[in-house]
Image (cartoon, grey):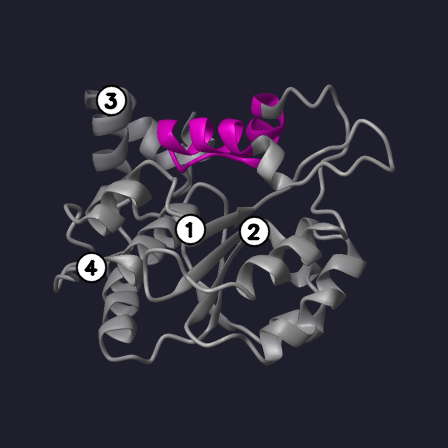
């Protein structure tokens, strides 16, 4: 995903680009704020920019081999963790099992809610969380060398859904990460995270979209015009999820 594909949030885009180009991006970032404001899209664009072979002043080039893989969500050095369900308590299922659904949902739009993700999973009202066993997968992936890029990126969507054991297991790797490895966490309720996790990340607040940006997004995404466009932009309070 390119930064230009994300509605609004220009100050945050510029900040992320600047920190990458100046070599100041922390190894762990927590993007937090209301749902539907572009946090996950920003995380995807940042991951693509970090791996891009021909970085531009306005973000990833979108043309190199790395960017082409990023656009299809198949880059071998970009990994994803997200809430899932298990049929049985002793099931060994991990996020890898649900990658086809994850990619499908993201390629439609990075603006979606936890409930919409559960519908995509067809979880049949089963509780979806990030299980303790996922921490072992995260550590294993980060302890291998990059395949294509010169860094590895782990996007964790809704880290507040992490099992407490999983969260505790990640503390060491967050404190002492492998060289050129990045965690990008995307949270809507950061107050539910362990304080020991929050203390190890740089927090970036992603605010609701101003009505001007909402009108642009709604016109492009849903073809709204006139009074309907103005009314929906106003009542959705800066969230493209709420606008649906």
- Read off the residue under disc 2: 188
Query: What residue is disc 1 on?
Result: 39
Which one is nearer the viewer's eye here, 223 or 178?
Answer: 178
Element marked by disc 1 = helix
Q: In the image, which residues are magenta?
A: 99-120
- Quick check: 35 above or below 32? above
Left/right of residue 116 with respect to residue 163 in the rendered view:
left
- SS for tag 4? loop
- The earlier-in-sequence mark between 3 and 1 is 1
> Who is closer to the viewer here, 170 or 43?
170
CB within 8 Å, label 2 to label 1: yes
Place of residue 61 in the rendered image (x, y in percent of width and height, measured from the top left): 15, 52
Question: Quick one: label 2 or label 1, which is nearer the N terminus?
Answer: 1
Image location (x, y in percent) of residue 110: 40, 37
The residue under the point 44% across, 41% down is: 36
* SS at circle 2: loop
């Amino acid at each position: 995903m390119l930064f230009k594909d994300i509605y609004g949030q220009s100050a945050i885009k510029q900040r992320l680009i600047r920190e990458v180009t100046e070599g100041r991006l922390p190894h762990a970032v927590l993007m937090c704020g209301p749902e539907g404001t572009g946090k996950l899209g920003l995380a995807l664009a940042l991951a693509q920019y970090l791996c891009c072979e021909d970085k531009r002043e306005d973000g990833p080039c979108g043309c190199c081999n790395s960017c082409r893989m990023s656009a299809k969500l198949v880059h071998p050095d970009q990994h994803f963790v997200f809430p899932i369900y298990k049929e049985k308590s002793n099931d060994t299922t991990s996020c890898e099992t649900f990658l086809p659904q994850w990619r499908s949902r993201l390629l439609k739009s990075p603006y979606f809610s936890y409930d919409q993700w559960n519908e995509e999973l067809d979880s049949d009202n089963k509780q979806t969380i990030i299980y303790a066993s996922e921490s072992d997968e995260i550590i294993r992936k980060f302890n291998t060398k990059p395949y294509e890029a010169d860094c590895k990126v782990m996007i964790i969507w809704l880290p507040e859904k992490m099992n407490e054991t999983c969260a505790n297991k990640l503390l060491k790797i967050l404190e002492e990460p492998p060289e050129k490895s990045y965690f990008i966490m995307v949270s809507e309720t950061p107050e539910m995270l362990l304080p020991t996790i929050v203390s190890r990340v740089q927090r970036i607040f992603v605010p609701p979209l101003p009505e001007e940006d909402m009108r642009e997004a709604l016109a492009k995404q849903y073809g709204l015009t006139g009074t309907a466009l103005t009314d929906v932009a106003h009542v959705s309070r800066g969230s493209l999820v709420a606008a649906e």
